[in-house]
Image (cartoon, coloured by chain):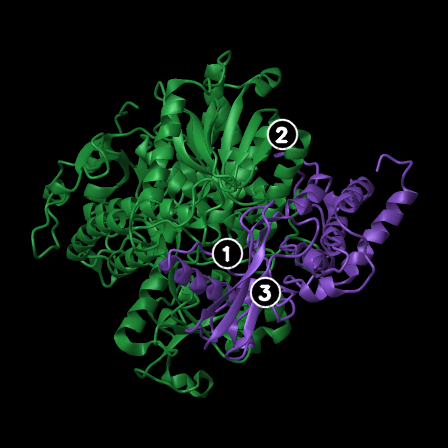
Amino acid sequence: MNARPQTAAARAANPSAGPAATQQKGASVAIDIDQMRVVGRPVDGQVPDVHPRDAWTDRKLHYNLVNPNNRRRFKIIVVGTGLSGAGAAAALGELGYDVEVFSFHDVPRRAHSIAAQGGINSPRARKVDNDSIDRFVKDTVKGGDYRGREQDAYRLGEEGIRVINHMQAIGTSFAREYGGQLATRSFGGVQVSRTYYTRGQTGQQLELAAAHALSRQVAAGTCKLHARQEMLDLIVKDGRAQGIVVRDLVTGKVRAQTAHAVILCTGGYGNIYYKATLAKNSNATAIWRAYKRGAYFANPCFVQIHPTALPLMSQWQSKKTLMSESLRNDGRIWAPRKKQDDRDPNTIPEAERFYFLEERYPAFGNLVPRDVASRNIRERIDAGYGVGSLRNAVYLDFKTGIERLGAKLIRERYSNLFDMYEELTGEDPFTTPMRIAPSVHFTMGGLWTDYDQMTSIPGLFAGGEASWAYHGANRLGANSLLSGCVDGWFTLPYSVPNYLAGLLGQEPLDPRDQTVLDTINDVRAGLDRLLENDGAYGADHFHAKLGAIMDRYASVSRDPEGLATAIGMIRELRQEFWRDVKVVGQGDRLNQELETAGRVADYLELAELLCVDALDRDESAGAHFRTDHEIDGEAKRDDEDWCFCSAWEFPAAGVDAKPIRNFEPLTFRAVPLQQRNYK
Amino acid sequence: MRLILEVWRQESPDAEGSFETHEVLDATPEMSLLELLDRLNHQLVDNDQEPVAFESDCREGICGTCGLDVNGVPHGPEDNVPACGQHVRSFADGQTVRFTPFRAKSFPVIRDLIVDRTGLDRIIQAGGTIAVDAGTAPDADTLLVTHDDAERALDFAACIGCGACVSACPNGAAYLFTGAKLAHLALIPHGKQERAKRARSMIAQMQHEFGPCSQIGECALACPAEIPLVAIAAVNRERLRAGFKWRKAN
């Protein structure tokens, strides 16, 4: 990838621009970041040099096409069957390509997209609330605190319009007004109503529709489904991604699949925090092993902490549960004005309730973006105003909403969320305010991709949460379902053929090729290393320890000393893991301990890169809030030195060597740089 | 709390299975039944024994991955709640909790409490889809759907595909699952185009792998998505309707 001059931003992103890049300003003890990473070179996002609004049109115009008769000659691997994976596989299958689909689930429809609740944004702008694609881009870029590409956001908005048409057509029953038109609601970080929804189960309805569309292609024979198979490595030969190595989770058999191109739609890495809102099996293995084969990893420190999850309520609670952001439409967040107030919330008079978001951010109120809401909630809890038996929550109260709209309408909007809350807590939100607390929920970082969603390894593409695109340093609510759908249905089906067109006449890599055999052997050696390790603790033990480190030092707020401490602790924990992990059972059959151990081993490496990135990024931006860079309690960006995407490169010397931080300069033409302000 | 866990262990699909009995001494009422199994597995791993294989993913009741019988009841003692939302508080101190895999001939055991439920997805593949390719859909705002139709469609579309209905049914029928899909797709505009063809192919596939319906209603009691029992009527209704339409393409 060659650097293309990007004038002002290139200068701004120049790592030698100032001492900020090498010496951490805020640290009282000098922390030498140069001991932890090497500064690399600029990378090119391959964004067309036109107005951001026209970039997608321009790009599509220049894409190469593949003749319909030739499409079946191209084999494409899709890993993951969430919204982006199922969409990409189905759309490429519909076009006539030969698609091999891999999922570690028993059936495609279980992918974690299914758990998204609140809705999907689309700037269809049918109402007179002054919405438009430009406004959507402004909200998305500003919400992301200017650390994503404007052009990506434009594509997201533009293609997002027909996403609704398509998902409706293939089976999503979107909420309707009494006149029969599509209904919308509002989400955080915006002042218009552009979120389409199906009760509190939008992700489920979209995921089922997408997975069923994939089923249609499976039945038609264009997509071959490989369920209960987990990708454990990427095959790279001649600088191109040419296949993957998978383990059959039932038989334990390790084998390779080669292809002309590989698409990873394997989701985010939030489970690194041990107890997050993610599904138990969501993991980082596919993207992390691609990173170790040369794909750049973008902005790993951009991790979204969702403000409204169920707090931990007991020792054995296995994960946290999200309560949709849509609840903030009609729910009001408050904490008692008195510390350690144990009274029944319904008996606390209005004057003794602190509606802190409404008071601090009158313009956006309860609908401030997630990072702002999370930090404020955490601040209240840390200051001693937390409620619940563990004092680790604040209230989300629907009393006013019910009085204003009636219980029937509230039930219609949120019934399944209220039911879920009651199922999990035994309390009825109609009569008692919910208790909520921040939890890790989404990772904006991910594999670095260019404007075509191709990673730094030619032939390797990424879609959805697995990639870094669209969301910058903070994702707006209801933009993730959108980005999954847009990548899957309306981006990868254009950009992957553009890459394939250059390979016409070439067969997929021979499965007996030495590189394939070597990669298989590497995977087997890795599995054997785990199985043969003579330790005393299951992998979960180390995962819990890692989660505690991450929660303490790399959560809603970070500081250089803490991050440096965390890096040391993670390195130690990694050594401890390899000294003391044990995997009971065998490798030649279903073995969930082995699956977990491999994933935790990867988390222990990725966690370090996440903290190094957080330490390296000497500014606050969106979800990355550094206490040494704030202005009136808000994130203070440094656009002079840090207006770029960090694209980390795995060092040739291995995981214990210093990673290389390359950078893609970001420029803003449509949405001029400005400090975020939701007051 | 102390609970006695009787768990079905079966190494592989062809292996002979048997019950194993374990004790969990530090169970707490607010634990979910899956967390109880987590706790048991921690104990087993600590003692170098293989943990009990069971499936779960979102643990929020939406993915449908969890599925096991608890004291002979799909998902557990509470009606209409998935296993991840069932709690230890339903049991008394010292009580025995028996975990078995979903019981249905069409759900063969893979290992311990994990069964193969792909038969449900073969019903989908047979026709539970809508033949609209990416990019070809008309504007969704121009196709009006009444508020009530959209809501009713959602009542059926809420199915999480866990298979509890099949396990609950003495006949191992998949009528609730299939009927929910047919009813959902018959209520939305694009789904209506292939309605008769879909009914024929899905019902044929369903009958090929699953048992007949005797209208007992256990399925609706077990269903974590509260799919209404009228879904089973949709199977017969759609079949009848498709029969009248047999001469037409659809």
Q: Earlier in the sequence, mark 2 or mark 3?
A: 2
Question: How far is mark 2 from mark 3, CA to CA?
Answer: 34 Å
Quadrant where the N terminus of chain A is found in the figure = top left
Crowding at dot 2, Cα within 10 Å, few <14 / some 14-19 / many 20+, comes out as: many
Quadrant where the C terminus of chain A is found in the figure = bottom left
Q: Position of residue A290 (x, y in %)?
A: 36, 34
Disc 1 marks which residue?
B58
Disc 3 marks which residue?
A416
Residues beneath discs 1 and 3 located on the same chain: no
Q: Quadrant of residue A200?
A: bottom right
Colour of chain A in the image: green
Q: Quadrant of residue B191?
A: top right
Chain of the residue that carries numbered disc 3 in the rendered image: A
Chain purple in the figure, letter? B
Say what amino acid the circle numbered 3 marks: Asn
Residue visible at 33% across and 55% down?
Answer: A543
Can residue A179 be seen by looking at this rendering?
no
Residues beneath discs 2 and 3 located on the same chain: yes
Crowding at dot 3, Cα within 10 Å, few <14 / some 14-19 / many 20+, comes out as: some
Label 2 secondary element: helix
Residue visible at 78% across and 43% down?
Answer: B208
Chain of the residue that carries numbered disc 1 in the rendered image: B
Q: Decide if residue A211 is on the left or right side of residue A42.
A: right
Chain of the residue that carries numbered disc 2 in the rendered image: A
Of badges 2 and 1, nearer the viewer stands 1
Question: How far is mark 2 from mark 1, CA to CA?
Answer: 30 Å
Disc 2 marks which residue?
A94
Say what amino acid the circle numbered 1 marks: Cys
